Every structure is written in C-alpha cells, then in structure tokens.
Amino acid sequence: MKKLFIIPAVLLLVGSCTQKGTPGTKMSESQRLAEGKTIFENSCGKCHDLPDPKAHNDTEWIGIVNAMAPKAKLSSEQGALVYDYITSVN
C-alpha cells in the first residue's frame, strides 16, 4: 500500500521539475532565453525603463531579480528565466 503513495509523489515531484512547453519535452536553451527576454521586456518594462544587463554582474543580478520578481508577480521559474536571459547578454 505504501508503494501506491510513493509513486504518485515521485511523479508529482518529477513533473514539477520539468520545464514548461509541450508535455514530456523540455525547452531548449534558446527557447529559455527567448522566454526570459519576453518576461523581462513585458513584466519589468511595465513599471520602469529596462536596465542594461551589462550594468551589473551576475552576482548582483541575483539580488536584483530576487528583489524584483515578487513585485512583478513572477514565479520562481519565471525569475530564473529572466536571470538566465539577463546574464546571457551580460
């Protein structure tokens, strides 16, 4: 009986770790960066001018994204996509 509860829990955990897109597929790096750029432009650009990604180093961007993501109502996955995009052009 315990196995019946363990299997769905494992599947839920694995399913929650997969990236968005077509079920069963992962986004490519270029898709992740494109999605991050879109979120950056649409969400961050709503409230202020977009910062130059080169204005801060990768470590500084961690703090900035972590501080701003809740204000922009971004999920942790969306925040990670924005961070990946910003640091890819930095």
Image (cartoon, rainbow, N blue to C red):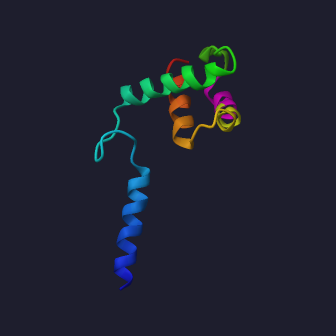
**Residue nearest the viewer, comparing 59 with 68:** 68
Relative vertical location of residue 6 with respect to residue 87 in this rendering, above or below: below
**Residue at the front extreme, as displayed:** 46
The residue lying at 56 percent from left, 42 percent from top is 76
Residue 45 as seen in the image, left or right of residue 33: right
Q: Is residue 19 left or right of residue 25?
A: right
**Which SS does the magenta portion mostly show?**
helix
List x then y, in percent, for residue 89.
Answer: 51, 18
Location of residue 64 in the rendering, given as x and y in whole percent from the top left corner: 69, 30
Query: On screen, 81 above or below 45?
Result: below
Q: Position of residue 16 (x, y in %)?
A: 43, 53
Q: In this orientation, which residue lies closer to the viewer: 75 or 54?
A: 75
Residue depicted at x 39% and y 74%: 6
Q: Which residue is outermost to the bottom?
A: 1
Left/right placement of residue 11 relative to residue 85 reads: left
- Give the image location of residue 44, x and y in percent: 62, 23
Q: The C terminus lies in which quarter of the figure?
A: top right
Q: Is 82 colored magenta in this rendering?
A: no
- Residue that appears at 57% across and 35% down: 79
4 to the left or right of 71:
left
* Residue 14 figure quarter: bottom left
Number of numbered labels in the structure image = 0
Residue range (magenta): 57-64
Look at the picture and state if 10 lies above or below 90.
Answer: below
In the rendered image, the quadrant that contains the N terminus is: bottom left
Quadrant of the rendered image containing residue 13: bottom left
